[in-house]
Amino acid sequence: MTPLNETHSIDLRSWVASANDGATDFPLQNLPFGIFRRRGSNESFRGGVAIGDQILDLASAVHRGVFNGLAQGAAVSASRERLNDFMAMGTSAWSALRLALSRALREGANERHALEACLVAQSAAEHALPATIGDYTDFYIGIHHATAVGRLFRPDTPLLPNYKWVPIGYHGRSSSVVVSGEPIYRPHGQSKGTADTPDFGPSKRLDYELELGFFVGPGNRRGAHIPIEDAESHLFGVALFNDWSARDIQPWEYQPLGPFLSKNFASTLSPWIVTFEALAPFRAYCRRAQGDPEPLPYLRSDENMARGSLDVQLEVLLQTEKMKHVGSQPVCLSRSSFVEAAYWTPSQLLTHHAAGGCNLNAGDLLGSGTLSGPHPSQAGSLIEKTIGGREAITLPSGESRIFLEDGDTVSLRAWCEREGAQRIGFGECVGTIRAAPFDTPGALHPAQTGHPHGD
Amino acid sequence: MTPLNETHSIDLRSWVASANDGATDFPLQNLPFGIFRRRGSNESFRGGVAIGDQILDLASAVHRGVFNGLAQGAAVSASRERLNDFMAMGTSAWSALRLALSRALREGANERHALEACLVAQSAAEHALPATIGDYTDFYIGIHHATAVGRLFRPDTPLLPNYKWVPIGYHGRSSSVVVSGEPIYRPHGQSKGTADTPDFGPSKRLDYELELGFFVGPGNRRGAHIPIEDAESHLFGVALFNDWSARDIQPWEYQPLGPFLSKNFASTLSPWIVTFEALAPFRAYCRRAQGDPEPLPYLRSDENMARGSLDVQLEVLLQTEKMKHVGSQPVCLSRSSFVEAAYWTPSQLLTHHAAGGCNLNAGDLLGSGTLSGPHPSQAGSLIEKTIGGREAITLPSGESRIFLEDGDTVSLRAWCEREGAQRIGFGECVGTIRAAPFDTPGALHPAQTGHPHGD
C-alpha cells in the first residue's frame, strides 16, 4: 500500500483558487483522473485531472512541456482517449505523475503560467467512460445488504453458508456501463406474479444500488496468481457506481445462473477515478464480528486486515420530476460508509478473482456490490429501504416512492474525511429514469434498432 | 433467414482439389472465416477462409484485386486482424463476399491464377481469436443437460419453473476465451466437503462442456429492441465452444449470483466461424414436447418455429497422455445434435438478450450452454456422463475417468449433413489440461504474475 507522502499534506494550497475551498471534492490532495472534452464540441475526448472546479487538460499540459522523466511518459498515457494505457503502467508511473501534478499546481509553482492555459471549467465539460472496460465483475461484499435482502427470502438464515468464506461475485455486462448523466431506460423483461403465465413488459420495480467501483491497473496472465500482499499494486483507483436493478425481473430469471436482464440494461459510473494513492490517509481496518472465520490463507495478510479497507462516506440523493419543476433540491435517501458495509477489502476481491486462473486486464472494473449500513436509514437500495416494497417512502414534496418512477434522478456521492487530513470527494454519479423506449411486443416496429424514442 | 442460392449447390467443385474430398469439413459450400498467420512467423494475424486443407489469405487476395464492389469492401474488412468490422457490416456484405469467393474458387474460375498464390496450408498456420469479444454470454438451452444436472440436485423437479419461459443465460468472462489449442490450466478455488472449513486448491472435478457459440453481427443501441423476425440478420455465424467447468468449485460459490471461478479460468473457441448463410440447407424446426408452453409473443414468429433451429451433429473426443504415448487415436465420448438438444433458437437468444435494453456489439459471443441428448451416450459433459461423478468411464486404453486429468486432450467436432446438400464441418475445438501453474498458497511467490510455469 502507498505510504503517506508530501502530496497528502493538509497544508498544501493550490494556485487554482477553487481547490482551496473547503467544500470542494477536488482539493490538491485528491487529483482524480477522468476523460473529458468541451461540452457540445467535436474535440477528441482526452485525459484530465480535476482540481477545484476546473479540469487540467493533460494533453495540453504535455504539449507545453510541463513534465519530465517518468511523469512525462505517464502524462502522455493519461492524456489519451481512454486511461487503459496509464492504468497498465503501475504504481511508479502513477506516483510520479501525481507528485509532478501536486508540485505544479501548488501556490507559487513555476508551472502556473504554462498550466493556466490548460484549464477547462468542469461546468463546460462533458465526460466519456474513463476506460474501455474489457470485463466488469460485480461483487456482493455489503454484508448488511446481503443480510437484509436475504432476510426477505429466508428470515431464519439470511446469509448463505458461503458468504463469510468466498467473496461472492459474478460477471456483469460491460457494454452497458455508461458515464454519469447518460439516460437510464426502464428495462423490459419477464416477471411472474400469481398467474400461470409470466408477463413481459416494462419493469415496475426499478431500483438503484449504491456501490464503489475499483479499476484494475496492471493485470495478470491466464493461470498466474496475484498474491494478497501484491494485490493493491494491481488496483488503480475508485469511482462511484450505480448498478441499476429491476427487482421484478430478477426473482423470475436468476435461478440457477444469476441475474441477467434485471441488471444488464445499464450501470452508471462517475466520471472521476480517485487513485488508491489519494486514499492513503483514509485506510481502515477491515471489520469482523465476534465469531467470524479467519479468511483462508490466500485471502489473508496482516497489512490487509489492518489497513485494507477504505473509510469512505456514501450518500444517495433523489430528485423527482415534480421536485425539479418546483425547484426543490435533491433529498438524501440514505447514508452509509464503505468500511462499515464491506465484509471484504478491494485487495481480497482482486486476489480471489485471479486465484482460479482468470486473467485480469488494465481497465477491468470490479463493483463492490450494494453498500448498506445496518440501519434502514443506511440502505443502499430501495428494496431494502422499503422492506421488499412493502413500506413506501414519503418525500418532502408530498410524493411517495416504493421504487423509481420515470423522471426520477438518482445521485450518488462519496467523500473521505479524517482529523489531520484534507477532505477529498468523488464528485457525483447521476442517472435519470426514462420511459421504456419501446412499447409492448404487439407494437414493435421491425426496424426499430436505431436510437430509442425521446432521446 | 438467408434463402438457398447458387453457393449451396451440391454440384459445385473447387480448383482447390482437397475441397472436393468428401471427408473435408471445408468444401466450397462452407467458406468459414477465421484469423491466422503462418505458424511461428512474425506476420500479422489476418482474416482467411478455409477451403479444403488450405486457407485463402484475404489480405493477399484483396492485394491482387480479385474482388469488386460490395465484395471488395467486405473482403477488406474481413482481412483485418480481427473480424469485428466485417461482422458489423451485415448480411448484404457477408453474402456479396461469399458469392464472390464461391465463384472465384470454382473449377474453371478466371481468378485461379491470382488466388493460387494466396493459399496457405492449414497445417502450416496458427490461429488467433476470430474477434475481439466485447462481452460473452453463456446460455443454458440444452434441455436434456439442464434436466440431467437438475436431477442430481432435485430428483423430483429437475427443471426449474422458469426454464420453458425464459432463455436462461448469464454473463461470462470474455478475457479468458481462448482459441483452440491454447493450454487449459487446472483452476484453483474453494470447495466445501464435509469439514466445517472449505478447502482452497486445484480443482479435482474438472469438466468440459460441449457447446456452440454464436457471433453477433450488427448490434443495437442501448434501449433498442431487436424483434424476433429481424434477429437472424444480427447473427454472423457459429463456432464450436468448450466452456470448461470446475464442478467442485461451482456448488460452493454459485449461490446466489451464479458461477464465477468455476467457469472464468478459460473457455475454448474453434478457429473457424461457419456463417448462417452456409447453414441455410441445414435449418430445422425448433422441437417442442406435448404440453410445452408457447413462447411469449416477443420470442415467437412462424419462421423461427419452422426453421429457427440448426441441424448440427456434435461429438466429443478424448485422448489421454497414455493414449498419445502409445499412438492411440482419440476416443469418442459422446454424440449429440443441436436440434435435439436445444430448447431455444439462436434468434430467440439474441432477441431475449436485447429485450431488456442491453446493447449488443459486433463480435459479442453467445454460448448455447451444454448440448446433450436425452441418452447418457449423448451427454455433453462428464458430470452427466458419470451421473454426478458416481460412475467411472472405462477407456479402451484400460484407463478410467470420472473427471479430466492433467494431460487429457478434449476435442469437439461438429458437422451438418442432409440428403441433397453438401456435408460441411466446423473443424476442431481442442484443449489440453495442464497442471495448475501455481502451488497451494503457502508456496506462492510474491512476484509470480508473469507467465505460469511449464508453458
Image: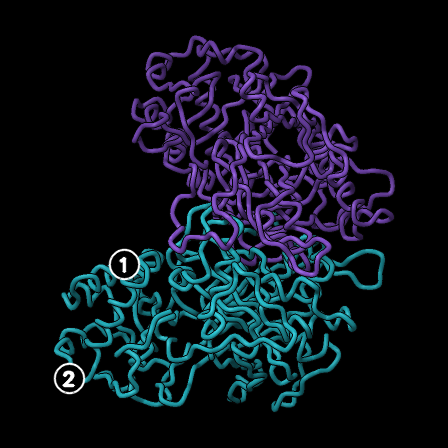
Chain colours: A purple, B cyan
**Most extreme residue toward the front, as rendered?**
A442
Mark closer to the chain start, 2 or 1: 1
The residues tagged by marks 2 and 1 sit, at their Cα atoms, a distance apart of 27 Å
Q: Quadrant of residue A22?
A: top right
Q: In the displayed structure, does residue A45 sit left or right of residue A263?
A: left
Spot occupied by residue A247 in the image (x, y as percentages of width and height):
66, 45
Q: Nearer the viewer, residue A142 or A332?
A: A332
Spot occupied by residue B374 in the image (x, y as percentages of width and height):
63, 81
> Which numbered circle lies on residue B77?
1
Q: Residue at x 60, y 34 (%)?
A: A405
Q: Quadrant of residue A400?
A: top right
Q: In the displayed structure, does residue A73 sit left or right of residue B184?
A: left
Q: As displayed, is residue A132 above or below residue B164?
A: above
Q: Are marks 2 and 1 on the same chain?
A: yes
Q: As displayed, is residue B382 above or below residue B353?
A: below
Q: Residue at x 51, y 88 (%)?
A: B329
Q: In the displayed structure, does residue B139 sit left or right of residue B26?
A: right
Badge 2, how many Cα within 10 Å: few under 14, some, many 20+? few
User: As shown in the figure, which amino acid type bears the numbered disc 2?
Assistant: Gly
Q: Residue at x 70, y 27 (%)?
A: A334
Q: Quadrant of the N terminus of chain B?
A: bottom left
Spot occupied by residue B123 in the image (x, y as percentages of width and height):
34, 78
What residue does disc 2 label? B108
Could you tell me which secondary element the residue under label 2 belongs to? Answer: loop
